[in-house]
Amino acid sequence: MRFARPTTALEATTMLAEETGLTRILSGGTDVMVQLKAGAIEPALIVDIKHIPGLRAITSEAGGFRIGSAISGAELGEHAELRALWPGVVEGCELIGSTQIQGRATMAGNLCNGSPAADAVPGLVAANAVARIVGPRGERDCLVADIPASPGKTTLAKGEFLTSIFLPARPPRSADAYLRFIPRTEMDIAVASAAVSLTLDATNVVIAARVALGAVAPTVRLVPAAADAIIGTKLEDEAVAALMVACSAACSPIDDKRGTIEFRTQVAGVLAKRAVLIAYTRAGGKK
Amino acid sequence: MKTIHVSTFVNGDAVEFICAPDESLLDVLRNRLGLTGVKEGCGTGDCGACSVTLDGRLVCACLVLGAEAEGAAVGTVEGIADGDTLHPLQQSFIDHAALQCGICTPGILVAAKALLEKNPDPTDTEVRYWLAGNLCRCTGYDKIIHAVQDAAQKMRSA
Amino acid sequence: MALDNSPKRVFTVVGTRPPRPDGVDKVTGRALYGADVSAPGMLSAHILRSPHPHAAIVSIDASAAEALPGVKAVVTAADFAPQEDDFLRDVLDNCMARDKVLYDGHAIAAVAATTSAIAKAALKLIKVTYKALPHVTDVDVALRADAPVVQTGRSLETVPEGMSQNVTGHCEFGHGDLEAGFAKADLVVTRSFTTAATHQGYIEPHACLASMTADGKADLWCCTQGQYNVRSLCAALLGMEASQLRVTASEIGGGFGGKTTVFIEPVALALSRKTGRPVKIVMSRDEVFKATGPTVSSSIDVKIGMTKDGRITAGEAQLRYSGGAFPCGTVDMGAQAAFAAYDLAAVRTLGWNVLTNRPKEAAYRAPGAPQAIYAVESVVDELCQKLGLDPLNVRLKNAAHKGTKSSYGPTFDDIGLVATLEAAKAHPHYSAPLGEGQGRGLSAGFWFNFGGNTCVSLNVNTDGTVGITEGNPDIGGSRAAISQMAAEELGIPYDKIRTIIADTSSLGHNDVTDGSRVTFSVGLATIEAARDAITKMCHRAARIWGIDEEAVVWKDGAAQPAGPNAGKFPPMTLADIAAVSFNTGGPIAGHYEFNADGAGVSFGVHLCDVEVDRETGATKVLRYTVFQDAGKAVHPSYVEGQMQGGAVQGIGWALNEEYIYGTDGRLQNAGFLDYRVPVASDLPPIETVILEIPNPGHPYGVRGVGETPIVPPLAAVSNAVSRAIGTRLNSLPMSPPRILKALSKG
């Protein structure tokens, strides 16, 4: 195995593209190191991207924020303006692992690890975030929702990696929220999760919404029917009940050591209900 | 596997070592630098026994490559005391019987010190969540929380 | 001179909270644990483990591994001494599979190489041909006539005819007429329970460093609860004499019973013998879960009858425990402990040990008791609910007391159960109001406590300080407690004493640190060793004063002339006598060796408040209080620590911890990510109330305290959850999916 520490994106993508063996990007390392320890992967090349300029910065852009792909959860959480604009995205990222994990883990890494239970991803999908990818053929932008392909797999081509994630500007009276269920209070992988992003009009009616669920399908799932259930409403009981039904209907989870199909399906609806109420309140909504 | 030469700072001292490209910072600290106060409980970031600071951030040394330490500053339990004067947290852990077997203690001390540097007056709940990544199987955590809070109080009034 | 043998009541050092002697080493990272030492020329070794839950080993070809540069030796079961004795053969077979692998993770070969990475690479080059066999991991399935047989010919004569060959042992305890008892009851409740296997979860993985030389002498450093036991087992497995093997116990990073046997130690010795170099083995966390001691999994039926006014008329329990692929006697302890808290006219418990394709059980804090008492205390609680009775009053009404013939045979001496129950009843926790969706549970708990073989040396140094050499690894502050008892007896300050743990060549045999025996047994031996030294010091003073030896007493840390000589000479302190010892007969030391008896049983009562989220099945523990009789709390902080730590392990067992096996017979959660021990943010403060009902078997009244606290939480939490949600769960852990399912059924 070789370890490389490139200082430009071009250098990084070139070495990743040219390597014939298995390659891994190292940013926070919280997934790669575990896989190495378990002997699950034996990469020929590990590329530490943290020394590429810009990857460890959060910058304002067009009323939104561009988050470098090597920004850790702890750094994200310390950015007050970002937290004010996208609280649900930030809280999702901050739920990954312990304080120690937060010192290293990145949103981009959480996304590219390809886990359907990734805590950072539902919030990004609900936010309609866009990833900037650099590769052998240059730079491209891609919806975050289009990056996970299946558990452990992404749509990124050989040599490609994320340099940043863009969270757009928001209309007034907008907010988001993320909730997950775990058996303990910390340290577990989500058994089910839900993110909601919404915008209200001046009369407290939801005029736009996106609902995304995690750990209930092979990839994080956007649920338009759940959003439709609350758009045009003030979250009356029937609307929230319809959102729960739509969420549970969108689930196609598995039975495993972390939870049952039945449990995940039921709890995904509960989490979506609770998240939508939090987002509504954050957006200034009063029922 | 070709080894890598790394220059770094550990507990304030300039240190050089060589390591394999896939060698963790934990293995480097324990096996190459003799800093066995950094403990391995799981090797997967789930127990916190190997907690160290890396450029001031609390991390699990098992989830960092040794090679990543190039030019960085690493802090371990061995660097907490000031000569033969214990840090208030260390004294507090002894005074409050906040350790039984003691294997989790180095990691918890490093983590608690990082907390109090960021938040000198945490609530019990904040201490419990900050330390959620540090497993202790002996104490049930109760005396650990008391010890951290007592040290925090002493540090605030010092 | 005469010594007062009635339990002491007034203390100066015992009952205080001095700093522990190993404290500074442990907060500075200097304390040396199992994996913290190395030796010149040391090799690293790793172990190849079976991916199959049950398979015959057809062949092992290690030639490619042996040919890898850097590999120095490979060992398999063939490298150990054959064992005639069943117990030793099981220990060996568990360390290294012989003809069959019996569980996922069973060791099959080991490689020593110049680096850890080479040893790991070499494991992949060992070709093992297996013939897969049908497996069984569930205790109830293993009992069926058509179940796969884990091992043949292991059933003891006690097992009734016609049972599956997986049943290896049977036991029965009790007294009285059950039928007549149940006939007197106004209500009889019968329920079936299951509990999952849980792991001790010590944070320090097993680690050792072995070094054997060409003349057959060996040194072994390892983390263990009992270095003498390690010596006996390793010497037998290697075919060595005990005198040639010196075992040193490292600081130990938790054990809870799980470090009372050997796993890697004989393997490291065999590799060192084969290579002529020191060999170090450190287990990974995955190996710890797969191949070291979980506790038993269990399936239990309980039937209890009660009158309308809360008198228990009869109790019966049938316990089926599986300690994995090897016979074990844990069910005997469960069957004895099940009804120990009750004064019953009619009681019977039956136990069966069942083999399954799981790792060999190792002791876990009060082994066997938590499962059995969980089942009994759950049924008692249900009876109280159905009869509209206060659960604490019912336990008081039926509580075992001095003179009770216990359900397992012996008649109790002074025990603290009634006082402990009364303390719980009087505590504000018991009467605090509960909110919507909340429930309060309580449970009593019991542990026997052990005594056992113990040996202590106490050396009086010429500068007036004292060194104590004892042989039990300090797992939770025992060096402090031992020093305190010596200070108390000698009448010198605590900080004049240093207590160390001997290696096996420096002191006579000591039983393992288990059964909550150390503060009791080693403490008692320390007091007696101190008295031995005191007698010798009084003799020295008599000689100096030229008076009769019998005319000297030891008081306030000094020899004093007594009787007709009283006041004739100024007292001589320990330091005065020590300073001139070379002129009065030589060094002064006290010794004591015995097989301790009279440990004194221990009872505890736990109160637990929970809140259950009815939409997700999540349980939050809101308040938790532990009441326990410590006899005499030598170092109250470490007594509280035992009570708190045991309670939290029990809470984990009740809510989230479990071994999860797939249909393929493989362990699915061999790591701290999915084997969910409680984290700090899961818990409330754990309140403690220590009661001190002196144990007549100890000069200071000390009882063991370490194990009892893990017993009550299972039922205390379960009873609280059941009352909070209005329906009973009879299976542990009560994970959120199980609670949600129970709620949906109503």
Image (cartoon, coloured by chain):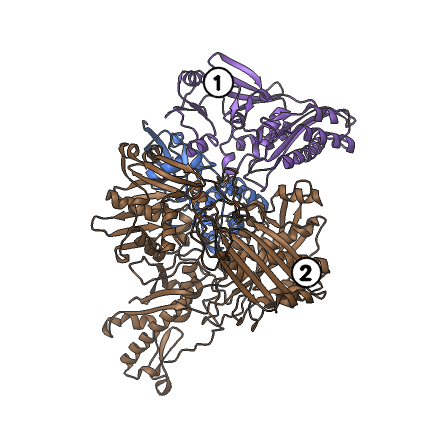
Chain colours: A purple, B blue, C brown
Quadrant in the rendering for residue C596: bottom left
Q: Which residue is mark 1?
A: A160
Mark 1 lies on a secondary structure that is loop
The C terminus of chain C, quarter of image:
top right
Is B95 or C512 nearer to us in this picture? C512
Give the farthest residue toward the front: C162
Quadrant in the rendering for residue A261: top right
Between circles 1 and 2, the one closer to the viewer is 2
Q: Which residue is mark 2?
A: C188
User: Vertically, is A174 above or below C202?
Assistant: above
User: Vertically, is C152 above or below C598?
Assistant: above
- Chain letter, disc 1 residue: A
* x and y percentages locating residue A241 in the rendered image: 75, 32
What's under tag 2, amino acid-wise? Val
User: Vertically, is A157 above or below B62?
Assistant: above
- Chain letter, disc 2 residue: C
Quadrant in the rendering for residue C277: top left
What's under tag 1, amino acid-wise? Glu
Is C13 or A278 nearer to us in this picture? A278
Q: Residues within 10 Å of mark 2 (few under 14, many from 20)?
A: some
Q: Is residue C384 left or right of residue C448?
A: right
Q: Is residue C490 left or right of residue A107?
A: left
Give the farthest residue toward the bottom: C564
Q: Residues within 10 Å of mark 1 (few under 14, many from 20)?
A: many
Residue C223 shows up from this direction? no
Q: Is residue C421 left or right of residue C115?
A: right
The residue shown at (39%, 67%) is C595
The N terminus of chain C, quarter of image:
bottom left
Is C270 or C684 nearer to us in this picture? C270
* x and y percentages locating residue C580 in the rendered image: 26, 72
